[in-house]
Amino acid sequence: MAHAHESNTKRIWVVFGILSVITIVEVLFGIYKPKALFFNNFAGMNLLNWLFIILTIVKAYYITWAFMHMEGEKKWFRRSIVWTVVFLILYLSFILLVEGNYVFDVYKTGHLKWIF
Amino acid sequence: MGATVITDEHALDGGPGPLGATYGKMMMWFFILSDALTFSGFLAAYGFSRFKFIETWPIADEVFNHFPFLHGVNAPMYYVALMTFILIFSSVTMVLAVDAGHHMKKTKVAFYMFLTIIGGFIFLGSQAWEWKNFIKGEYGAVETKGGSILQFVQKQEDGTFKRVALADFAATLPEARTQHERSNGVWFMDEATLPTYSVNEVVEGFKADESILVRSEYLNAEKHKTVLSREESLKRLAEAKYVVEGANLVRNEYGHKLFANFFFFITGFHGFHVFTGVLINIIIFFNVLLGTYEKRKSYEMVEKVGLYWHFVDLVWVFVFTFFYLV
């Protein structure tokens, strides 16, 4: 293996701390829903949702890099996994969410009535 | 030119693979990659449906607000947050097992894997409880012939609205009928379980109690569900077709039909992954106890099953965000 086999116990607990703190922050924001973040719109979503998504990606980073030990793998092995999944997910979400928004507009302004 | 004897010690495990990883570990990573894309397909489809019905989608905080032993208390999010902690913690014990494996400490690996398996079972139990609440429902609702869900509220003294259960106001009419079962009708035919109240009983009860109002699925400017006036409520109720209690794959009392379908499908698919993860963990746990990896002089199998287990945790982090927070 490329990575040395020294003990990482301390780092594991530090990462656990980070993940717990992020989860607690998410839950607090989810319960109190600050008005400044909740009642506005940026690129199709309110800022609170963007905050949740960013925090989730931070959590995903720590789980993949520290727990799944991605940081110890060779550079191109890492990239063959991470770049593939990141690109395809961005592409799929973009296509589907834009389409969903479009269908919403069609239902709202069209002559057909759905769910009345 | 000697006899072709396989002398390579890696002949059966594929040997040291490319890019500094063994083939086993690499294939586990590529399996995880494809599984991640399956899950993102589900979540993106959920996002699609949500954007498509953005004005009428149910509010997760109102649906998932139960906590064990706190009956009737509005506790949004706490339970799923707890489930998240259970899963993150079992990820920690898993990574500690992998770490102990690097140092060839058999007892420590076994102990941490045992804790991971326990964590997995607790998570599965929690999810079963969550499903039970979701399927059972709390208040009940009425579906119109156009497919929209009407819920019932009562105005409180402070001007806010409180949900009312069908049992609180539905009338009792002399029209009770028995469930049509396979045994008592046309051969091998039955019907869906009858709700506790008929549409008539709900409508009559609603007419009799002036304080009850209908809550529509539409979100207003405060991002709450719109409550209709008494006249509008009666008009909407005239179109009532079904009484809905709890949730199944056809209709649910929380709102849009797709909401329950996605809930069952995504958390169910994730729960199935947790279940298989626990099974694989148990197999590897017994292998550790039997000393298989001690003889092999490598605990890489623990590392590989660990990758899968962390992936399950990773997926939950996203499910938690998109189902409960966003």
Image (spheres, rainbow, N blue to C red):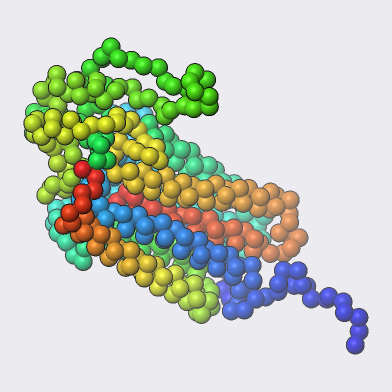
Please, is residue B284 above or below residue B37 in the view? above
Residue that protrudes farthest toward the bottom in the picture: B1
Where on the picture, by quarter, is residue B99? bottom right
The front one of B24 and A42 is: A42
Please, is residue A86 above or below residue B221 in the view? below
Query: Residue sitting at 49 percent across and 72 percent down?
Result: A81
Query: Residue sitting at 74 percent across and 63 percent down?
Result: B296
* Quarter occupied by the N terminus of chain A: bottom right
Q: Position of residue B248 (x, y in %)?
A: 39, 37
Query: Residue sitting at 33 percent across and 30 percent down?
Result: B245
The answer to whether residue B193 is left or right of residue A67 is: left
The answer to whether residue B182 is left or right of residue B266 is: right
Please, is residue B148 above or below residue B296 in the view? above
Residue B238 visible to the viewer: yes
Query: Residue sitting at 18 percent across and 45 percent down?
Result: B218
* Quarter occupied by the C terminus of chain A: top left
Please, is residue B218 above or below residue B73 in the view? below
Residue that protrudes farthest toward the front in the picture: B186
Q: Position of residue B92 (x, y in %)?
A: 49, 54
